[in-house]
Structures are given as C-alpha cells and as structure tokens.
Amino acid sequence: MVENERWIRVHVERKRAGEQLLSLTGDRERRIRSHWLLPDGRIEAESLICEEGRFPSLSVSLPEVAWDEREIHDMFGYVPEGHPDLRPLVRTPRWPDSFYPLKERVAAPQWLDVEPDNPAKVVEGEGMTVMKVGPTHAGIIESGHFVFSIMGENILHLDAHLFQNHRGVEKTLEGLTVTDARPFVSRICGADTVSHQYNFVSAVEQLTGREVPEAVAWQRVLLLESERILSHLNDLAQIPAGVGFTVAHQRGLAMKEVWQQELAAVFGHRFLFDAMNQGQITMSGKERFLTALSSLEREWGKWRKLVDRQRGFHDRMRGVGVVRREDADQLGAVGVALRATGIRLDVRAQMPLYRHVQIAIPHVSGGDVEARFQVRLQEVENSFRLLRTALEQLRKDATRDDWQPPVDVTGEAVGYSESPHGLNAHVLQIKNGRIERYHVRSGAYRNWPVLALAVAGNAVADFPLINKSFELCYSCADR
Amino acid sequence: MDLQRKSFQLRHVDAGSCNACEQELTALLSKELDMQRYGIDMVASPRHADGLVVTGPVTDTMKTALEKVWESVPRPRKLIALGDCAVGCGVFQAAYASHGGVGAALETPDLEIRGCPPDPKKILKKLNP
Ligand code: SF4
C-alpha cells in the first residue's frame, strides 16, 4: 500500500518538476517501468513489481498515461487498478482470452471468428447522432476507426479506435541481434524512420559506452533534419488540401517529390530507410546535396509567398481545432502540437547530438490549425540552417561508420529524439546481444488523445482539416 | 498517344503498412506523375472501383474490413498488392498479428508491385503498362 502511494506520488512530482515522460511500459519479469527525461538531459527510471498481476493506475493523477496503462493491460494482462477507462486499446474481440503477446513466448494465436470492434464511448440523448468513419477510408490514408458523437453539425465527442495497423513489431524484435533488428526498426513508420533508427543505435551505444565520432554525429544531424524537412513538407502540403487550396497543396507536394528524389540520389532511399548504416556522405554527394538544398530553398521562398499572402487561407485555419495549453501539458502533448500552444519544448535541446548548435524554437501560441502550420513553417527554415551547419562540419571524405556493438551487449537503455511528429522514445532491454524487450513510444501515440480533444466543439466538416494539421502517423502508434 | 484509352478506377485499403507505400501511391496524383491523364484514378468507394490496391501485410484487425471492401468491388475486378508487405515478402511477414500478405490473407493478387516502398514511377508503369 505504501509502495502504491509512493508510485503515484513520485510520478506526480516528476511531472510537476518539468520532467518529460519518455515511456511507461511493462516486461515479462512483472516489472512496470517508467522513464523520465530531466531538463538537464539525464534519464531516470521508476520501477514497480506487479504483485499478483496488479499495479496502481496513474491515469487519474497523470492522464497522459491512460493509453500506456491500457496497452500494458492488453499486452501483458497486468491490471492497472483504479484506471478510469480500462477498455481494450490494442487487443480486439478476435484475440483469444489467454493471448498476451508480450507476456509469454508465444506464436501467432488462433484468431476468433468475430468482428474486431471494441465498445465505443458515445454521447447519448435527444438530437445526438453517432457517426462512424473507417477503418477504411475514401482516400489514400492509413486505417483508423473514428466514432463521432455529433449534434447538428458539431462534434461533441470523438472516440478514436486505432491500432488497426498493429503488426506486433515489439514482439517481432524480441530475440533478434542488433544487426538483424535494424531493417525492422527502420520500418516501424515511413514518416519518422530516421528518428526510429537513431533511437535504436543511440540506445545500443549508451550500453556500450561508445564515444560517437564527430563526423558520425554530424551525419546523423544531416539525416534527422533532412527527414524533418521531408515530413514537414508533406504535412504542410496536406493542410491546404483540407480547405480546398489545391494549388498550394500540389506545389507543396511537388517540392516534397523533388526533395525525395535528391535524398534517394544522395542517401540511397526516398524515405531514408536504413540510411543510418549507409556510411557518411561522400564529397560528390555533398556537392549534390548543397545544390539540392539551395534549389529547395528557392522553391520554398516562392511557396511561402503563395501561402503567406492568402488571407482567406489563414482565416480558415484560425480558431479551428484549438488545443489549450493546459490540456497539452496534462495530456503530455509533444512536438508541433505542443509547441503550437506556446509551450516551448523541443528535445533536440537536450540531445547530446545537438550540443554544438542552437535549436530555435518558434514563438507561436494559439494552439489552432494556423499555429501548427506556422510552427512547421519556421521549423523547416531552422532545419535548412542546421543542414548547412552540418554540411560545413563534414569536410573530409570519411570512412564508413562500420562500428558494431560487442556481441554480448547487455542492459537497458532509452534512446530518444525529436521526430517530425514529436518526442519519440525507444526502450531497449538486451541480454548477451539478443533483444529481450523492445518498446516504442512515438510522438503520434501521445498526440492522438490530444487530437481527439481538439476536435470536440468543431464542425464535422472541419475534421479533415484538423486531422491534417496534426498529421499523426498510425503505424508508429499502432506498431 | 492513344486518346481513347480505357479507364482504371482504384480503391485503396491500408492493411498495416508503415505509410511509405501510401505516400508513394499519393505521389502518383502529383503534378509530376499525374496518373489521371492515363485514365487511372483513386475512387472513394469500392463500388465505383475496377480494382483494389492493398498495402501492408494484412493485420488481423484489418482482415475482416479488407474482406468486406474486396467483396464490394464489382466484377470483373483486379486485386493489386502494393509493396513488399502486401506481396508477402516484407519484413513484418512473420509478426504475430500479420497474415503474411494479400495472397495468404485474401487471394492471389492479379498484380504484384514489389519494393519497400516501390518507386512511384515503377508503380505507374505497372498500373499502366
Ligand atoms: S513494403 Fe516497405 S514501405 Fe511498404 S508498407 Fe511495407 S515496410 Fe512500409
């Protein structure tokens, strides 16, 4: 009992002290572990043994972990006692009762022959309508199921049922060596792949005490910022589509396409899959990259003029999909969605990788679609500058970074980074070179509940616009 | 140029992709590739479609939805597996919640487009030989 009270107290205190929650997860040894990022960049852990398969829920005092605790319940069967909403999150009625994928070493189960839908939370009463959308959609987007409670044209409540894309990535990584795990980690998500690759390599390096050579570090900055530009270009191009501003949408996508072709030419892949183990940029690659960067900056300048001067476009984005600052803080919002509320947190400021550069955090508040649009605009331009700095540092043709961890690497470490979609953390437990447990807590996962809250009170017709202004990945939340 | 080509209307379903295959499919609608000029387009309903493009290894949670969408596509129809995951040779083949691609989960596709993800130019070539 004392232990339970302590568990809740320490977490509340950490939150109050301005620490950021990296992850909350379980393992086969019945441990519940949380990891916190301190303002000075250190990472600290809290740990609790699940007695008789139960642990005290933190969700009431720390609402941002509501999903994490539901997930622990789904994947391990450990019960968060006192959780206000313990419906299944990842598991579906098709999962056999005894199937807890992360608890035992099991193969694929015999799925039950029923529909996969979980119970939805809806608002009932006179004049209320329930509108279900998905899991398949009319356009080319990822799968997700949304249950809207609407009155007239307004959304009162959104219950987001995601995890249709749950493949079982964390389980798949168990038992693999570092080398074998790389292509899997690279494909957790197509939009934040470099951030995922970085987290993995950074966790392994922490365990082996590797001093990362300067050139390797700059190469990583190059990749991370190239990805941020790619992802932000995509997301910025999608927002105009949400209001029928097609010319900005198409021109934005055209910039993205050219950038992808250049990334493929220089780093070998249009999305930078597996790029972190490709070795350093060559001198000819660097020349090409600089030319590509300059021409993108020119195109960008024209595109900015186009979107900046369209007053109607900005009017359309203002006051829509507002995230209040207090809610962002309470729900542990991350990335663009957080910074758009005026909370100026970007974990690049804590990452050792960026210690030689100044991370400019946009001064934006308002928390609406317009604010998220503005944050991305400024971040793209900051990334242009970071790319130039990194390129200047990469003066010499260096040899390939063919560092391999010792075969018996053992321990637990957390890799984290600021992905284009916010703070992304990986927890690695490895023993004698084989992964024991792997946990991925992506930016999108934190922000989905924030999005659900932001749409309440808005017109149904504005959902696509609000959704695009967050542009959250499904796959790295669903895994 | 054949000005009277046939049309090919497609519906897309994501069955567990990492989103890169989707982005490449979207690139076919861009100024540069513009597949609509060949009469190929994405449609909002399976009932308006001549074919279904599936991405991802077919996760268990998407399996029934995918079956329903496929059932709704009027005959004759084409089934297209886009990307290694959907083709059945991607990295997440053996994950517990994966049904191992379109062929194993639904039926043998009429067209397989390999790659992780496949290059958009290649996708267009395959769709418009
Ligand atoms: S084939 Fe590759 S790019 Fe396509 S969904 Fe699978 S992992 Fe992603």
Image (tube, coloured by chain):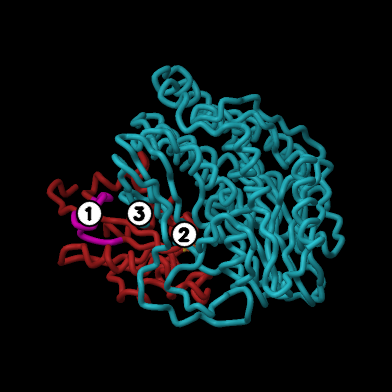
Q: Chain of mark 1?
A: B
Whether residue A295 is visible, yes or no, is: no
Say which of marks 2 and 3 sits in front: 3
- Mark 1: amino acid: Gln
Residue located 55% across and 60% down the image: A86
SS under mark 1 = strand
Please state the extent of the stretch shown in magenta in the rendering.
B40-52
Residue type at tag 2:
Pro
Asked if the beta carbon under badge 3 is closer than 8 A to the nearest atom of ligand 1, the reply is: no
Give whichever of discs 1 and 2 has the lower sequence position. Answer: 1
Crowding near the residue tagged with mark 2, few <14, some 14–19, many ≥20 C-alpha atoms within 10 Å: many
Q: Is residue B50 magenta?
A: yes
Closest to the camera, between mark 1 and mark 3, is 3
Q: Which mark is residue A15?
A: none
> How far apart are labels 1 and 2 at the CA level?
22 Å
Q: Name the image quarter holding residue A120.
A: bottom left
Q: Ligand 1 near label 1 (Cβ, under 8 Å)?
A: no
Q: Which mark is residue B117?
A: 2
Q: Is mark 2 within 8 Å of ligand 1?
A: yes
Q: Residue furthest left?
A: B4
> Of helix, strand and loop, which one carries label 2?
loop
In the figure, the shade used to draw chain B is: red
Give the quadrant of residue A8.
bottom right
Q: Are marks 2 and 3 on the same chain?
A: no
Residue picked out by circle 3: A134
Q: Secondary structure at mark 3?
A: loop
A2 relative position to A247: left or right: right
Q: Is residue A254 left or right of residue A286?
A: left
Q: Do we see residue B11 in this rendering?
A: yes
